[in-house]
Image: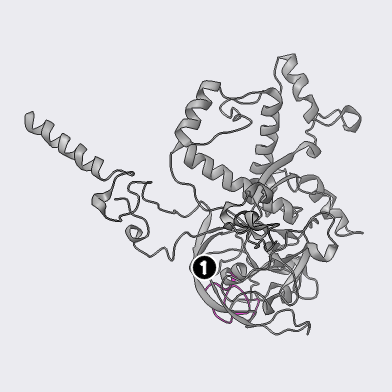
């Protein structure tokens, strides 16, 4: 017993010598035990895309002679990417989260104050307003008249209902989120000080600037524009898709459409918060990297599937396989839409993946990227992780709101399915042929590295 006590006392003494605030015996050893050993797992539904170098824009003829797809050798960091486009059912989780958070805010269902204090002390986070109580189900048809009256504002007013159906008002589904404009924050402040005493303030490091000036708050309605099926194609009968495509279970695993670039960006912010709050608050783990839209360079690198100068994601120069079957959902044979197996969109993952396990990188729906469109962007972007970003404001001219879309869709000819083809759409428009998928940057060099060398706990 005595030996056991001495053993534990010795361990306690050694631990105190190596504590986070210890001296390390006078040696520079870094901060000890600052966190658990970090490991970045494959996010659910995503595949790993290794870092690499390739000729962006190569392997395809510029048949339009527009000179907007110029070849350039670039290098790209590793990342994870959704193996399919975001589906209706996945996006519906976002819509339902926004719906339920608004309802809980209205009802004032918050966690007990003492729980919040305990939670804030454990995580080091302070929430204002307090966290919503997600543990209790919302009683939409509650017997409590006060509850029903409080939730009434979320439904369509009576004069907008038909067949007396009580339905949620999509106009109320607004999501408020924050993001930091790092591009603006990184700009140098070359303003001259008014006098010598102000010089220290004017020349202080950029990291000490008041970052509130770069925090952006945005509010956006998250419900897809279901009418896009009609106004995209006048004189075409698409009413059933307008009425059923987003919410009916028959289309659960079809790619979501009618989502503009701003909504896709908001989805990525929500997805990041959904994961990190779960990891940090409930499991005490370190936050993961943010989800976001891929840059044009990342998208093209992923679409190539490791092939240097391929025309299409499947690695060949043709749209059919050796059996004569089409390899994507597009507009073949001068408008014989059904020849490839689909009339409009089809279920995700219907066609074979590329060599990195990504489905539908060409066809089905075109995809938003994070990159702003400029015909000459390859001339001024860097050759490592190139990206041209412009955060357009509502009052900016239309040409400043153009975002690159890639991959082609069910309504496009094969030229737009080529991995190097680039075109654009305006960030505040929603189309029946544009969807998106997310990426998550890999925090490190390569998955094959020894994790102990990348993150270690002493």
Q: Can I make out residue 237 in this image?
A: no
Percent x, y of residue 56: 61, 78
Instruction: In the displayed orientation, state which residue is furthest to the front.
Output: 196
State the scheme by which the image is colored.
one colour
Element under disc 1? loop
- The verdict on residue 342 being magenta is no
Question: How many tags in the picture?
Answer: 1
| Magenta segment boundaries in residue numbering | 303-320
Q: Which quarter of the figure has residue 244?
A: top right
In this view of the protein, which residue sits in the foreground, 447 or 207? 207
Q: Is residue 341 above or below residue 39?
A: below
Task: Report the side of 150 relative to 443 (left or right).
Answer: right
Identity of the residue drawn at 58% across and 56% down? 204
Tell me residue 451's x, y (percent): 35, 58
- Residue at 76% of width from left, 84% of height from top? 63
In the picture shown, does residue 285 fall above or below 393?
A: above
* Snapshot quadrant of residue 60: bottom right
What secondary structure prevails in the magenta region?
Answer: loop
Quadrant where the N terminus is found in the figure: top left
Residue named by callout 1 = 77
**Residue 458 visible in rendering:** yes
In the image, what residue occupies the spot 48% across and 40% down? Answer: 280
Any magenta on residue 304? yes
Mark 1, other Cα within 10 Å: few <14 / some 14–19 / many ≥20: some
């Amino acid at each position: 017993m005595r030996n056991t006590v001495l053993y534990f006392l010795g361990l306690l003494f050694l631990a105190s010598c190596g504590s986070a605030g210890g001296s390390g015996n006078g040696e520079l050893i870094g901060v000890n035990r600052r966190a658990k050993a970090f490991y970045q797992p494959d996010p659910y539904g995503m595949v790993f895309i290794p870092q690499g170098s390739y000729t962006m824009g190569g392997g395809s003829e510029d048949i339009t002679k527009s000179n907007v797809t110029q070849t350039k050798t670039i290098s790209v960091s590793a990342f994870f990417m959704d193996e399919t486009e975001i589906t209706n059912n996945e996006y519906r989780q976002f819509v339902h989260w926004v719906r339920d958070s608004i309802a809980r805010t209205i009802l004032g269902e918050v966690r007990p104050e003492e729980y919040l204090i305990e939670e804030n002390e454990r995580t080091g986070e302070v929430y204002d307003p307090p966290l919503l109580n997600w543990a209790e189900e919302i009683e939409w048809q509650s017997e409590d008249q006060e509850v029903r009256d409080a939730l009434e504002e979320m439904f369509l007013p009576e004069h907008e209902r038909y067949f007396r159906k009580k339905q949620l008002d999509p106009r109320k589904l607004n999501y408020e989120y924050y993001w930091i404009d790092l591009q603006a924050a990184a700009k140098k402040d070359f303003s001259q000080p008014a006098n010598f005493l102000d010089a220290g303030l004017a020349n202080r490091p950029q990291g000490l600037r008041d970052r509130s000036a770069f925090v952006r708050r945005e509010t956006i309605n998250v419900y897809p524009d279901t009418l896009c099926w009609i106004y995209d194609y006048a004189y075409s009968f698409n009413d059933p898709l307008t009425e059923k495509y987003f919410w009916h279970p028959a289309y659960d695993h079809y790619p979501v459409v009618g989502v503009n670039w701003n909504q896709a960006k908001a989805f990525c912010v929500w997805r990041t918060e959904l994961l990190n709050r779960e990891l940090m608050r409930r499991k005490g783990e370190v936050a993961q990297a943010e989800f976001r839209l891929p840059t044009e360079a990342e998208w093209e690198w992923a679409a190539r599937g490791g092939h240097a100068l391929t025309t299409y994601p499947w690695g060949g120069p043709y749209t059919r396989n050796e059996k004569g079957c089409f390899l994507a959902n597009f507009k073949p044979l001068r408008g014989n839409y059904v020849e490839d197996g689909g009339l409009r969109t089809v279920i995700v993952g219907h066609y074979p993946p590329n060599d990195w396990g990504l489905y539908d990188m060409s066809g089905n729906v075109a995809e938003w990227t994070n990159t702003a469109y400029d015909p000459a962007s390859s001339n001024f972007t860097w050759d490592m992780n190139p990206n041209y970003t412009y955060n357009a404001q509502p009052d900016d001219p239309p040409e400043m709101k153009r975002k690159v879309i890639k991959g082609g869709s069910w309504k496009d000819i094969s030229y737009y399915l080529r991995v190097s083809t680039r075109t654009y759409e305006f960030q505040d428009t929603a189309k029946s042929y544009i969807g998106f998928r997310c990426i998550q940057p890999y925090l490190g060099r390569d998955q094959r590295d020894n994790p102990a060398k990348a993150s270690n706990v002493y």
